[in-house]
Amino acid sequence: MPSFDEALQRAGEFGRFQRRAFLLLCLTGVPFAFLFVGVVFLGSRPERFWCRGPGAAALAERCGWSADEEWERTAPPAPPAPPGGPAPGRCQRFRLEAANVSALGCQDPLAAFPNRSAPLEPCRSGWRYAPAPATIVSQFDLVCVNAWLLDLTQAILNLGFLTGAFTLGYAADRYGRIVIYLISCFGVGVTGIVVAFAPNFTVFVVFRFLQGVFGKGTWITCYVIVTEIVGSKQRRIVGIVIQMFFTLGIMILPGIAYFIPNWQGIQLAITLPNFLFLLYYWVVPESPRWLVTQKKGEKALGVLRRIAKCNGKYLSPSYSEITVTDEEVSNPSFLDLVRTPQMRKCTLILMFAWFTSAVVYQGLVMRLGIIGGNLYIDFFISGVVELPGALLILLTIERFGRRLPFALSNVVAGVACLVTVFIPEGIPWLRTTVATLGRLGITMAFEIVYLVNSELYPTTLRNFGVSLCSGLCDFGGVVAPFLLFRLAAVWLELPLIIFGILASICGGLVMLLPETKGIVLPETVEDVEKLGSSIFPNACKCFQRKKTQVSSSHL
């Protein structure tokens, strides 16, 4: 009686059917990348902003000043910039009302005050921004004492990712992969539209959280479907190539932001493509591997026969039955991931790896928005830098396994961050080269952790396990904006020291994980516990466990 993997091999492990479904699902990575790092453009800070009091507003109107002229003549001097950081905004205003406004001259309004120094007062309203195109910063006045609210918007999004990992990850293991995928795509689209037209900051934050919940559902679920419908030999390729579509989204995003002048237009452009994925209902089936674990052998056989027909294969009458384990399918919980020694070790290390990857990756991406230069070009180049990472992974993980490239990519990222801190500003080419190596390293680490995570959990816990561990990625995303922007306000390079330490520690820990090169996806917790033993690669197809035959009446 054939096992599922034997039936899949007969139907075709990566034929026309899988290639079509794989390509379609890969496209999910493009809008997810938009959502993941879109705050860099949605929340870009205007070049100049200042507090505009009633007196300055009256003068500007009477004298017909442009925004630049008003800034030059009525904005107080800015405080000193932090070491290596951008100049802060002007968070106070001249109280021009202290003198007779009508007596103030258009050329030199401060002349009405002794020593040309009007009294200052804190700003509570009346912000003015230049240039004009709106971002969420200018829309909701997220400057000065409210600057931390911009950090909050990204943290809230990642909190949504974290919530989606637990709720929709659990739902996908309980109710099926494809139904949760489709619900998530619809949810991302609807909530994204509400975000674009949010009337106030509270509505914006609430629906950005919900967009994060559904966004995580689309990405994690499509990734698991892809890895479950192909054979073990193709998992490494599909697991890495799907990440390249995320990188493609990184490269496309600055082009969208460049040609669309305001944040609402950008938000709609990066959200609406999610509705197209609802068409997958007719072309992407439920994961047959999940159906087997739910003891729905007849449906699994139906999907396998559909795959075989599209691939030009034929399942013989001997494939009228498929084996499923007698292991009870229960509601997955965190205890299932830490109850046994091997599962516990894998879970804790993977959680730290996810956290580190998110903090360092998002930190380096968002850092582009505060270091100056041409944001659009720099962001595009940073995406191009990620492409060689996928190629390097494909060339190394089958030759050297998963563990060594995983560890080295983290170490390279960590060392690069630490070295960049101490390279003088006068050697920009060297700083750029080292920083590029760091971005390449953390990108590789981020891509490998997806692959390793999906290979280290049994089918009954795979979606939940990947979702839970990647939840630490989302927690890292909550921490990253506060870590970057608040520490950078003290010293621009201080966040790089934190990033470097985290990545270097992670590089050492991942060497403790079992090697998953060439193994068949584990079906049960017992299979995972045998990972790392010398017999597992050869014995994985013949574990002694009770079988239940599920016959199909439609052959």
Image (tube, grey):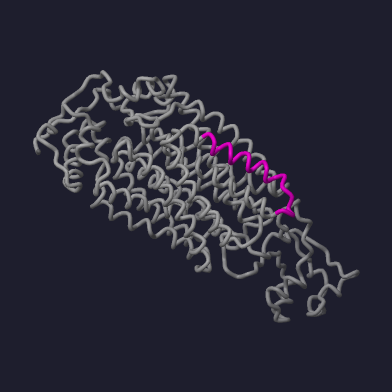
Q: Nearer the viewer, residue 86 or 92?
A: 86
Q: Quadrant of residue 377?
A: bottom right
Residue 246 x, y percent position in the rendering: 44, 51
Residue 467 x, y percent position in the rendering: 42, 37
Helix, strand or loop: magenta stretch: helix
Q: Quadrant of residue 368?
A: bottom right
Position of residue 358 in the picture relative to residue 515 (left or right): right
Residue 508 x, y percent position in the rendering: 56, 29
Position of residue 461 in the picture relative to residue 507 (left or right): left
Position of residue 357 in the picture relative to residue 20 (left or right): right
Which residue is drawn at the image coordinates 76% and 51% (left, top)? 83
Position of residue 447 in the picture relative to residue 306 (left or right): right
Above/below status of 515 relative to 139:
above
**Residue numbers of the magenta segment:** 407-427
Quadrant of the image containing the N terminus: top left
Which residue is drawn at the image coordinates 81% and 80% (left, top)? 105
Which residue is drawn at the image coordinates 41% and 38% (left, top)? 451
Residue 101 x, y percent position in the rendering: 79, 76
Q: Residue 417 colored magenta?
A: yes
